[in-house]
Amino acid sequence: MKITTSRVVIDAPASRVWNALTQAALVKQWQYGADLTTDWNVGSPIEFCNEWNGELFVQSGVVLEVDEPLLLRYSLFAPRPGLENRPENRFVMTYRLEEHAGSTDLTIVQEDPREQADVDETSDENGNPVLQALKDLVEKG
């Protein structure tokens, strides 16, 4: 299993970071223009849909855990040739928020059981344009 961990400190309260993670209009601004569809109830479907290289790209999964504004967890299936949409082919995204004196430490963990190199990675906003876009959106909001 490949585990990728990303961390960023956002100069805003956890409630604002939470909104950027869960409100479709805000998600679209920092996550490659993706349209988010879900009701954020545990067990409900979740879908991210956007255009990628001129084609429609849909990632779908299930909301696994919601503890506002501290924890958000869901599974996703990213289509690939020869890969079926089954639970064992879904990766899990976990967002942990910790507020400290008006700033929020956000840790994002992606657990990916799909067949690939078993290399764990860690990054921060300096090496991750999506994290930087999220940070900029929330801090300017």
Image (cartoon, helix red, strand yellow):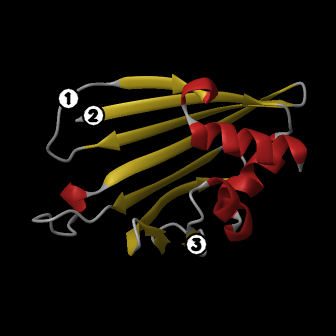
- Residue beneath label 1, please? 118
**Amino acid residing under circle 3:** Asp
Up the image or down, 42 lies above or below 116; here it is below
Query: Can you tell which quarter of the image residue 129 is in?
Result: top right
Marks 1 and 3, Cα distance to the nearest angstrom?
A: 30 Å
Q: Which residue is drawn at 73% across and 51% down?
A: 18
Q: Where is residue 109 in the image (x, y as percent from the top left)?
A: 46, 37
Sequence-earlier tag: 2 or 3? 2
Question: Is the N terminus in the top left, top right, bottom left or bottom right quadrant?
Answer: top left
- At a point 28% along the width and 57% down the height, the residue shown is 90
Query: Which label number is shown at residue 35?
Result: 3
Q: Is residue 134 left or right of residue 41?
A: right
Q: Do the residues labelled 2 and 3 touch (CB within 8 Å)?
A: no
Who's the residue at 82% across and 49% down the image?
16
Q: Distance between the residues labelled 1 and 2?
A: 5 Å
Residue in the picture at 55% in, 33% down: 128
Disc assigned to residue 19: none
Q: Which of marks 1 and 3 is in front?
A: 3
Residue type indicated by callout 1: Asp
Above or below, 105 relative to 135: above
Determine the secondary structure under disc 2: strand
Residue, far front: 54
* Residue that lies at the very extreme toward the left in this rendered image: 82
Q: What kind of residue is marked 2?
A: Lys
Q: Residues within 10 Å of mark 2 (few under 14, many from 20)?
A: some
Return the x and y of residue 118 as percentages of the image width and height: 20, 29
Q: Earlier in the sequence, mark 1 or mark 3?
A: 3
Task: Check disc 1: other Cα within 10 Å, few if <14, some if 14-19, many if 20+.
Answer: few
Q: Position of residue 64 (x, y in %)?
A: 45, 58
Please determine whether, in this image, residue 80 is positioned above or below residue 127. below
Disc 2: which residue: 2
Q: Do the residues labelled 1 and 2 touch (CB within 8 Å)?
A: yes
